[in-house]
């Protein structure tokens, strides 16, 4: 009588379908729960200033200008750098509320014309509360200023 070895017939196989399902669920979970922050997208070098810090940012409209002079209203980028395009983007994001405070964040290397264009667009739309974001002055800056006098 011949006894068959059944172990030779059993070939191990790896079923990847459950593993792929788990990976897709994890990817969907991380994409949904990830918070996107405008500060992490744009690297701005804010100008330095002394003064009191104001952290009241409830309901503020954020207008960022990078070093190249491109505009970002909250999370939306203005397609062009002219006043009309910027006004259109601000109006779409802000809606009809002109009493909101606008926090203007311009890179220290931003051309002055880009900042003036932003002020012009905000003024034409009727915004009256505009705050400028600055970085706190470092300890080395006052010493350098004192040496220059």
Image (cartoon, helix red, strand yellow):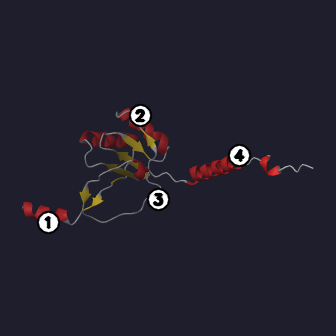
Dot 4 or dot 3: first in sequence order is: 4
Q: Residues within 10 Å of mark 2 (few under 14, many from 20)?
A: few
Dot 4 or dot 2: first in sequence order is: 4
User: Which residue bears the numbered disc 3?
Assistant: 58
Residue occupying the point 30% across, 66% down: 52
User: Which residue bears the numbered disc 2?
Assistant: 79
Residue occupying the point 46% across, 42% down: 76
Asked which secondary structure carries label 2, the reply is loop
Measure the alpha-carbon separation of dots 4 and 2.
Answer: 43 Å
Q: Name the front one of labels 1 and 2.
A: 1
Q: Does residue 64 sit above or below 80 in this rendering?
A: below
Q: Name the front one of labels 3 and 1.
A: 1
Asked which secondary structure carries label 1, the reply is helix
Q: Camera-side residue: 32 or 79?
A: 32
Q: Is residue 79 left or right of residue 67?
A: right
Q: Tag on residue 17?
A: 4
Measure the alpha-carbon separation of dots 4 and 3.
Answer: 46 Å
Residue occupying the point 29% across, 52% down: 45
| Residue 23 percent across, percent down from the top left | 63, 50
User: Which residue bears the numbered disc 1?
Assistant: 143
């Amino acid at each position: 009588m011949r006894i068959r070895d059944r172990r030779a017939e059993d070939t191990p196989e790896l079923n990847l379908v459950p593993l792929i399902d788990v990976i897709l669920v994890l990817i969907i979970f991380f994409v949904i729960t990830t918070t996107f922050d405008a500060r992490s997208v744009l690297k701005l070098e804010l100008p330095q200033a002394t003064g009191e810090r104001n952290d009241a940012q409830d309901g503020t409209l954020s207008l960022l200008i990078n070093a190249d002079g491109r505009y970002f209203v909250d999370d939306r980028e203005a397609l062009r750098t002219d006043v009309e395009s910027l006004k259109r983007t601000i109006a779409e994001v802000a809606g009809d509320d002109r009493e909101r405070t606008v926090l203007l964040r311009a890179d220290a290397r931003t051309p002055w014309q880009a900042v003036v264009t932003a002020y012009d667009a905000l003024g034409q739309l009727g915004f009256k509360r505009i705050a400028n974001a600055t970085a706190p002055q470092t300890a080395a800056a006052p010493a350098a200023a004192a040496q220059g006098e």
